[in-house]
Amino acid sequence: MINTLIIDNFEVCEVSEMEVTELFSEGLEIFKKNWIIAVPLVVVEIIVGILALAIMGSMVAGSGMMGTSGFQPNLAAFGAFMGAAFLFMIIAGVLRLIAYGMTYVMADDAVAGTADLNSGLQKTLGNIVNLLITSIILGVIVFIGMIFLVLPGLIAAYLLMFSIILVMLENKGPVDALQGSFELVKANLNDTIIFAVIAIVILIIAGIIGGILGLLSPIITGTAAAYILVVQLLLYKELTK
């Protein structure tokens, strides 16, 4: 059963617990027919993993050397490593953001018909400015919340979970996207909490399996994340139709 209500001119729907859990089954069927949805996140996770290994390798090789007097720290190499690590974080963040944007677009295309990599990339790059600004604001809010005993940061991430979807699919600006997500989640606490709990459990399991399998970790975690984004998109559509 779906109950519809209007909040600040924003029509939302309350979805029953059974329907929320059913979205995971529906998302799986869509995902199996459009496995290409997982490609952006899997590829990015592989790239990030390779870059991380390269940076760690360079740190081990250049951070110090053994001499007759023992281990001698190489401060210049350490400084270079810190700079490379900072650059790595920026590159990884941007690549993941693009992958998330592409995944949402491709998931939306899959719901309507068939997912397409080129369409996902073009639409994401075409909205990259709003995507970056929204992500930065979201990241700052969550980071500040994490400073205050972690919980506020988790709550902020939860309340703003639909921000990127609103940017990518509704062409909302950063402020409108963040506000729209807040209002949507606030109006559907039960449904979004159920989704968030199940999603976290799935991602934790995927992380454990990926950790055990080692080199296959980027494929497993990237695929799991893409699947969760598909279900999240379905939930968004249910809550706003």
Image: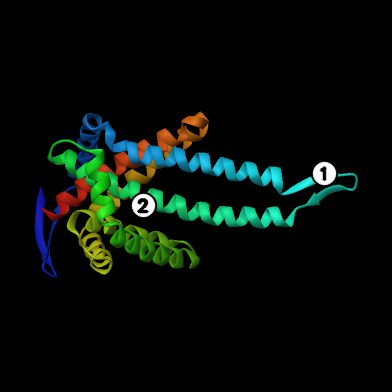
Q: Quadrant of residue 38?
A: top left
| Residue 194 image position (x, y, % from top left) | 28, 49
Q: Position of residue 74 (x, y in %)?
A: 75, 53
Q: Is residue 212 left or right of residue 78?
A: left
Residue at figure coordinates x 71%, y 49% from the top left: 63
Name the side, left or right, on which 124 lies relative to 208: left
Name the element at disc 1: strand
The residue identified by callout 2 is 97
Kindly give the residue lying farthest to the right in the view shown. 68
Tell how many labels: 2
Separation of marks 2 and 1 at Cα, in angstroms: 41 Å
Residue in the foreground of this view, choosing between 108 and 58: 58
Name which residue type carries label 1. Answer: Met
The color scheme shown is rainbow
Q: Position of residue 183 (x, y in %)?
A: 22, 65
Question: Which of disc 1 and disc 2 is earlier in sequence?
Answer: 1
At horizontal 24% and vertical 58% (from top left) the residue drawn is 167
Q: Which residue is the site of mark 1? A: 66
On screen, 207 above or below 180?
above
Tell me the quarter of the picture where residue 130 sits: bottom left
Residue 6 spot, x, y in % from top left: 10, 65
Residue type pointed to by label 2: Leu
Between 237 and 5, the residue placed more toward the observer is 237
Residue 121 marker: none
Q: Residue at x 47, y 63 (%)?
A: 146
